[in-house]
Image (spheres, rainbow, N blue to C red):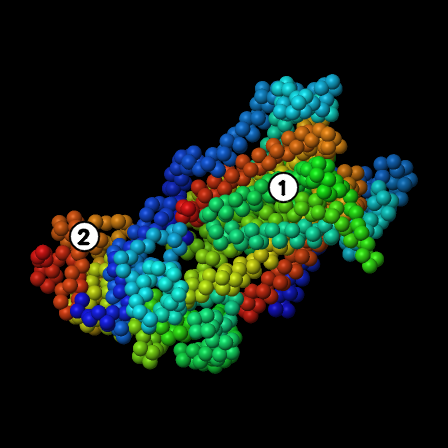
Amino acid sequence: MCRYILGRLAQAALMVMGLLVLVFVLVRLSGDPINLLAPRDATPEQIDEIRVAYGLDRPVIAQFGEFVVDAVQLDFGTSIRYKQPVREVALERMPATIELGVAALIIAVGLGIPLGVLAGMRAGSRTDGTVRGVALLGQTIPDFWLSLVLILVFAVNLQWFPPFGRDTFTVGGIAIPDESIVLPAVALALFPMAQLLRFTRSAVLEVAGEDYVRIARSKGMPRRVVYRRYVLKNAMIPLISVLSLQVGALISGSLYIENVFAWPGAGGLLAEAVSNRDIPLVQGLAFLGGLITIVFSVLADVLYTLADPRIRLGVAR
Amino acid sequence: MSAAGTDRLLEVRDLRVRFRTTEGAVHAVQGVDLELRRGETLALVGESGSGKSVSMLALLGLLPAKVAEVSMTTAALHGRAGIIDLRDPRQLRIHHVRGREIGYVAQDPSSSLNPTVTVGEQLAETVRHHLGLSRRAARSRAVELLERVGIADPAARADNYPHEMSGGMRQRVMIAIAISCTPSVLIADEPTTALDVTVQAQIVDLVRDLRDDLGLSVLWITHDLGVVADLADRVAVMYGGRIVETSPVFGAFDRPLHPYTIGLLESIPRLGRRRERLSSIAGLPPELGADLASCAFAPRCGHAFERCHAQLPAEVATGEDRTLACWFDVEAGAPRHG
Amino acid sequence: MSAPAIDADRGEVSGRVSRGWRALLRSPGGAAGALVFVALTSMAVLAPLVAPHDPLQQNLRAANSPPFWSDGGSWTYALGTDSLGRDVLSRIIYGARVSLAVAIGGVAIALTLGLVFGLIAGYFGGRFDRFIVSANDLVLSVPYTLLVIVIAAVVGNSLFNVILIFGITDVPVFLRVTRGEVLKLRDSTFIEAARAVGVPRRRILWAHLVPNLVGPLGTLATFEMSSMILYEAGLSFLGLSVPPSTPSWGNMISAGRDSLEVYPWISIAPGVAIIVAGLGLNLLGDWFRDALDPRTRRVPR
């Protein structure tokens, strides 16, 4: 077991390394990165300073080495627009994204899994068809467009929620977002919910067709017990992996959702940075995003091995 | 059929199963009559696709309604409290037919147990549900049962997960589950096919032991004639979704009456016989589930004549507690009269 | 897979394809999907003929006219106009060009590269395989949007760049499927049997791999086209795709943001186009999967 975790961590470390290479290479794709790393209005002297600061006058390998060392300390240089270290700017906006992500995840799980179970149990029925239709819509509706529609209907016309921004109320010194989180969370939850729904449905379907489910019925176990202990318990295991995928979807989605709702999170920051060609910031945020995804992927794998007794205890003869 | 009425434990008449598939209807079982008498062991013999497993699943109501159309004129279990109509789902539920009156052992022990629940718990939940035992009582009963089926160190084993056990042990667990509520009937669907030969013998011995001990009536499905000779009192031979011959075991081996049964027996290789080629039944098994109005075996039968290809042979009693569905009299070497 | 099954597959591909046409007409989802795809393609190709107006033509006097079903609207500008008086309907029709070009171009590149590298990885195995798989997994481990956006931010705005970006970043999925099929075939006992009889390995792979790849890759291609339309719209929305002078569904939605409360159709209409295109391709993909992949054949309801 320990060996597995260590192995997985080593693999993750390699992935992080690969991520660094990727980010490093991407920025240099279009030639001399100095154009991307320096503000447009910089004087030639300033450009030279920046060139030295980023080590661009050094050989590529040395540059990469320094890049890695810096990256480990989360030092990605200075944001062109904000004139502050990327790390500061990024970390300042993180909490808001985490809030939104958690809220969206709760919605996605709360809707996606039960609906998926429902559809799986009633496969082939009209309920199943309807639920699958909903899932399909969830995967084809652009989240940024839906955000606009939600704003139009619920914020402008019905006035139930604010159209943008993050408003909070304070409880015990901590600022907690109020109903301004609802619309963005719903929009962000759309795609993960649809995915969770589909995966849950097929997991349930697959398990429901297994021999041991039929044997359970053959020994007279009542339907409810069979569903709970035999179908659901086994179907939930592969879902752990799927949940980790959702983190990636949430990160991606936050880019657009935060942008449209002016939610002060890291996703919106990245969208803004990209529009402004603020490459140091883009670099830093992209790396962070990739890093978080890898971390959750490792976490999911470890949890999976813990949850499935077949893997946890090793397969016998 | 000379058995007295009270001897009949399980009675099935005209069982038919039809599957709906994208390629049309598959008639897996086409009018099967079965009778299991109290205390007897009936072997149901047939090759893959003959419909034997499907019959049992249909009887127990385990075929999903969306996929399978099941019909039976009679399906009666003479249970402790009277006659139970197995076609009625309500009665199945109320009388705890599945699991308490009828125990079922499936073929593949590697996929028949829930991989995420311990073996002991899978036993305990059965007795808790059917016999209303408390958790503690159920747990000790589970350990008892594991011991009864020959598993060493039962208390420790009860906390194992299925994948931590060998195939043979898992099958013992399945048997333990099947007999846990002392049923009157045990239906075993090829329980030894997926096991090593040495383990097979052990399982057969175990079942025989339990049968004698608990007074079980056993319906044993197999394609292994050796097991039939070893364990069974009577045998029913299935082909193409129908029963073609039933007979007390010795009669069947001594004097087989149906050409298919004869072919089966002949194809068993025997030591000491000098032969260059193994004998086998010519031709291929029938197309799965075609709805024939004639004898399914006719294309492969050496004795087939016009009537065989034109009319479905009716099942008739031929004396000595035997039935036969064939237009040909192999002993006389000529078509039957009537 | 046993030999008869694969042999049957081989001869059956042509049979399957012709049966496929008939099945397509019978299945409502598949027919709808095919219709959408045809409509989309026609719109894109025949845009100059189909569009009622020049998408770039500004008409400030008719700016922000509503669609024909609202008062103030007319059939001249059926879906209304935007803030510069450009006809929304015509811009949507021309926008289909961008979406379709990205979808088809991107999938074509991804499919080709994925197929080639998947074959190499599966066939040669060893170090090639390990390297390719690691690179593949790495790209897959990064959230797709993140990857695409970063690249788009660095290279410039152009349709060609976008197609290239999507084409290359989507290689991993195609690679994985191809490699999976090659491995499955390579490890099947039927291959051992054929080799034992003397059939050269290359011929086996060629004769049996292709029919087995058509189904999964065709299905995947259809679904990926749907995804690419969605992702391209996202990029356009952020201004990272085609230059703003070229109408694309995404940048139309973005342009309509400021006037959302008063002139909602400017943003809403292109979104509906995206949804319809996506739905259609998804349904087509579903049908593909059911028709060409015998393994997922189901019992009817």
Chain of the residue displaying label 1 = C
The chain under label 2 reads B
Give the residue at mark 1.
C168
Extreme-front residue of the structure: B81
Is A203 drawn above or below residue A183 in the view shown? below
Compared across the picture, whether C106 is left or right of B297 comes to: right
Residue at point 68% right, 24% down? C66
Q: Which residue is mark 2?
A: B312
Residue A39 appearing in the image: yes
Residue B199 in the image: x percent, y percent? 37, 74
Give the residue displayed 49% in from the left and 34% down from the top.
Answer: C32
Q: Amino acid at mark 1?
A: Ile
Disc 2 marks a residue whose amino acid type is Leu
Is residue C172 toward the left or the right of residue B80 in the image?
Answer: right
Label 2: few (<14), some or many (≥20) within 10 Å? some
Instruction: Tell me residue B295's x, y (percent).
Output: 19, 53
Q: Name the residue nearer the viewer: A285 or C81.
A: C81
Depth check: give the residue in front, C171 or B289: B289
- Residue B141 horizontal side relative to residue A183, left or right: left
